[in-house]
Amino acid sequence: MEGDEIQAKLQMKVIKPEQIPHLLEPGEVGCTLEVTVTDKEGKVTNHRVQKSQSFVRGFLELLWINMKPVDEIDPYILMDIYGVPRGLGSTGMTFGCLAAIGDASKGIRVGTGTLAPDINDIGLQTPIGHGTGVGQLQYSAVTFGAPASDPTTSQFTITRNFANASGGSITVNEIGLQVRAHRQDSAYYFLTIRDVIAGGIVIPNGQTLTVNYRPQCVV
Amino acid sequence: MLKTRLVLERLSQNGGLLDRREQAGRSFLKRFIELLYIQHAEIPDGAPYWLRTIDRIDFIGMITCSSRYHNNNLRVGSSPGGVSQFMQIDAYNDITLAQTVPGSALGLVIGNGTGAVTPTDERMGSVFGHGRRAADASPVIVESCITGDDYDSDVYGNYWRSQAFTPRFTHRVTSVRVKIWRVGSPGDLTVRIRAATQAEYYGAGTRRPGSGADLVTGTIPQASIPTSSPGSWVECTFATPVDLYTGRLYFLILSHAGGDTSNHTHWRQDQAGPAYERAVMTRYGSFISDSSNGGGSWGTSDDRACMFEEYGQSIGEFEIGGTDLVEMNISNPNGQFSIRRYFANYCGQSLTVSEAGLAAFMGRIYNSSGYYYSSGDVFLIARDLVSPAVVVNNGEILRVSYIPQITV
């Protein structure tokens, strides 16, 4: 079985207002995190929806850079996912996380680390790579659901599938969001969200994990 | 998770703290989510996402096209209220747009509206402008062109006419008067005010009534329209007055649902160098904009002005400082910064502040046939009711801070 590629089916749709999950308190800006494991026939074998715990410093710093806005002549310095300091100014590319199949530099990533999130996290503790080798998952493209709102909550959706064709089960313990920001024409990558899943979520060989991050505002 | 605190500090003229109010922000709106979405999803120029500006105009949201980078998205830092700022939206080597935005329209804003906050709020309930103007006890003439009419422009069916104007001060528009007369029976006349599109290319551009929502509408009954040339002044009072912001361009639009060449209204117009100089987007000064397809598209004509008077009331003004972002501080498990602005009351009377909000800029650049086009506008991303309201006496200063904080 190892090495066989699994074709994950992608679905993108605008979520209906009555389907917006309400886990955040009034006044909060955050994310809901939905994880679903499905088998080859599309049958759901595991499903959880929880409040994402953890914007990390990268989110606040990139928000600061764009809102202020910081000029690249007098840049704000923050650490990329490799621990390299990068001096950045405001650009139109900040927060971009559109990623193609197999692109693990940005978009939703998963890992096996279990350390509790820390505001100073700059990357996943133990990221899982893209592929069909032992301990690897196949990263789909990142897709997005357009903004929607109900009387209290507005949101959009970021989705990625992770198919397990490694030949064995893989337990995902941590999930994060990596985004890009630019200096001139060079892109660098930064962690904005990191969550640890209590007890982990097991993806048996041949099954697919779908992760939905839904950034939300609640008035 | 991110939470926001809203802090209002009333200061004496010498800066001494008189009163401090802190409340939880309730506060970020759908526009904030939409601006984040455009950035995260890297919305391209080929498939843009439409969103509404603070003047309810539909705006094509997108990130800058490939390899282009500045668009000032999510910018809330702003110049002082009385200063227009130059918004640079540039490409790799080229500055393609010199968009100006009044300082009072961007960043932290305050007002006296009391309507409940909803995620889809597009505007503040009512906003304080920049300056020292006291609240108007009754409507006053804000903008007008009342002399020099030498031409009739026809209004009927799909032929809509509009006059551009820029308010001298932020106010709530209550009514307009237009100099008109009619031929036959064109039906009731619809009066609307709609905001302008932003400049589209190379800085100057032409600006037209935008698509989106009318800011305010009213009706002049056919029976109130005189039947002989050169007509007379007829008033249209708006049932629900709305704010018009100083430094921003609006159009007063007249239209009929029916009518034809034998049944129409004439809107008196000056075609010979009108005196009105407060809608200057071309080298000739005042301009009008006409549509022959019911507002679907518009063409502009320079050096003309239709006869109009626009009435409204200021709710009072503060001298508004710049919006600054300060005190970035990350200390596990928290991280926060402050968005801060000073409002000085020298209008001669007390002003009551009952709402606060954040207005953010977003620009765009797109490539069409090898030419780069760009534009930008302002969006309300947060709104809070201040409860109980804060009364700022004449001579006092209000320091308002939004403090977004994340906690792990």
Image (cartoon, coloured by chain):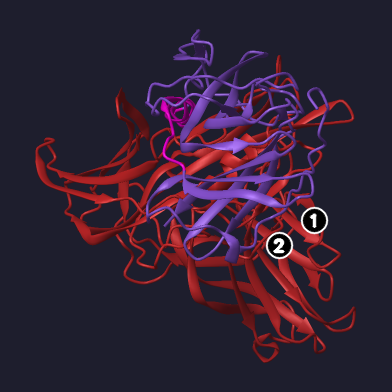
Task: State the image quarter where residue B136 is shown.
Answer: bottom left
Disc 2 and disc 1: Cα gap in Å? 9 Å
Q: Is residue A7 magenta?
A: no
Residue identified by numbered label 1: B298
Q: Is residue A56 magenta?
A: yes
In the drawing, does residue B63 fall left or right of residue A150? right
Q: Residue placed farthest to the top in the image?
A: A84
> Which of B317 and A13 lies nearest the eye of the viewer?
A13
Q: Earlier in the sequence, mark 2 or mark 1?
A: 2
According to the rendering, which colour does chain B have?
red
Residue identified by numbered label 2: B162
Q: Nearer the viewer, mark 2 or mark 1?
A: 1
Residue A219, position as x, y percentages in the image: 42, 57
Q: What stretch of residues is rendered in magenta?
A: A52-68
Task: Give the residue drawn at x 71%, y 85%.
Answer: B188
Q: Quick check: marks 2 and 1 in contact, CB under 8 Å?
A: yes
Q: Dot 1 falls on which chain?
A: B
In the drawing, does residue B381 fall left or right of residue B400? right
Residue type marked 2? Ser
Q: Dot 2 falls on which chain?
A: B
Residue type marked 1? Trp
In the drawing, does residue B177 fall left or right of residue A9? left
Considering the numbered disc 2 on the image, is that residue within a helix, a strand or a loop? strand
